[in-house]
């Protein structure tokens, strides 16, 4: 979908009351199933939020309550995403430290300062001063 079409759809969608926005969503899901178009799968927290939203709508829960619940789910999704990215960053840093870097001639390059051997026997505690 090109940007102009996406912006046009969003502009019209945002101008509708929330109840009609849900009708638009239902219609989009109907068209998607009718024409058997593949839909990009949502992540875990997003899928949970969508299922929760569908069940709350089916039970006739007020839109304000749904909005509040999904706000919490959205916040949880952002937290999980942040934690995931932090974990990836830590893994990249550990990989940079643990795996030897290659110099231009193809030989492994030691980290700055070389490899340092511990003093004394590690089973007997720290070395005496």
Image (tube, rainbow, N blue to C red):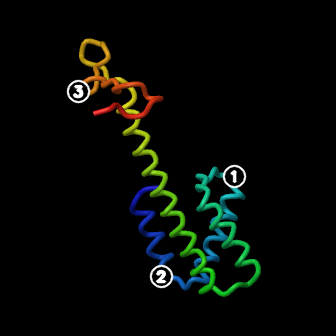
- SS category of the residue bearing label 3: loop
Q: CA distance from mark 3 to mark 2?
A: 62 Å
- SS category of the residue bearing label 2: helix
Q: Position of residue 112 (x, y in %)?
A: 23, 28
Q: CA distance from mark 2 to mark 1?
A: 29 Å
Q: Earlier in the sequence, mark 3 or mark 1?
A: 1
Is there CB contact under 8 Å for labels 3 and 1?
no
- CA neighbours of label 3 inside 10 A, class few (<14), some (14 to 19), many (20+): few
Q: Position of residue 87 (x, y in %)?
A: 46, 48
Q: In percent of the image, x 55 and y 85: which residue is there? A: 17
- CA neighbours of label 2 inside 10 A, class few (<14), some (14 to 19), many (20+): few
Pick the residue in front: 59 or 125: 125
Residue denoted by label 1: 36
Q: Is residue 72 above or below residue 40?
A: below
Q: Position of residue 97 (x, y in %)?
A: 35, 32
- SS category of the residue bearing label 1: loop
Is there CB contact under 8 Å for labels 2 and 1?
no
């Amino acid at each position: 979908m090109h940007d102009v079409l996406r912006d046009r759809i969003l502009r019209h969608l945002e101008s509708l009351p929330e109840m009609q926005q849900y009708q638009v969503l239902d219609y989009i899901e109907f068209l998607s199933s009718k024409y058997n178009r593949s839909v990009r799968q949502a992540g875990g927290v997003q899928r949970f939020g969508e299922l929760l939203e569908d069940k709350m709508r089916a039970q006739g829960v007020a839109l304000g309550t749904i909005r509040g619940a999904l706000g919490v789910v959205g916040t949880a999704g952002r937290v999980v995403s942040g934690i995931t990215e932090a974990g990836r960053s830590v893994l990249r840093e550990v990989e940079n430290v643990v795996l030897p870097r290659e110099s231009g001639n193809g030989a492994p390059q030691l980290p700055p300062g070389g490899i340092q051997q511990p003093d004394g026997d590690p089973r007997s505690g720290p070395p005496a001063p």
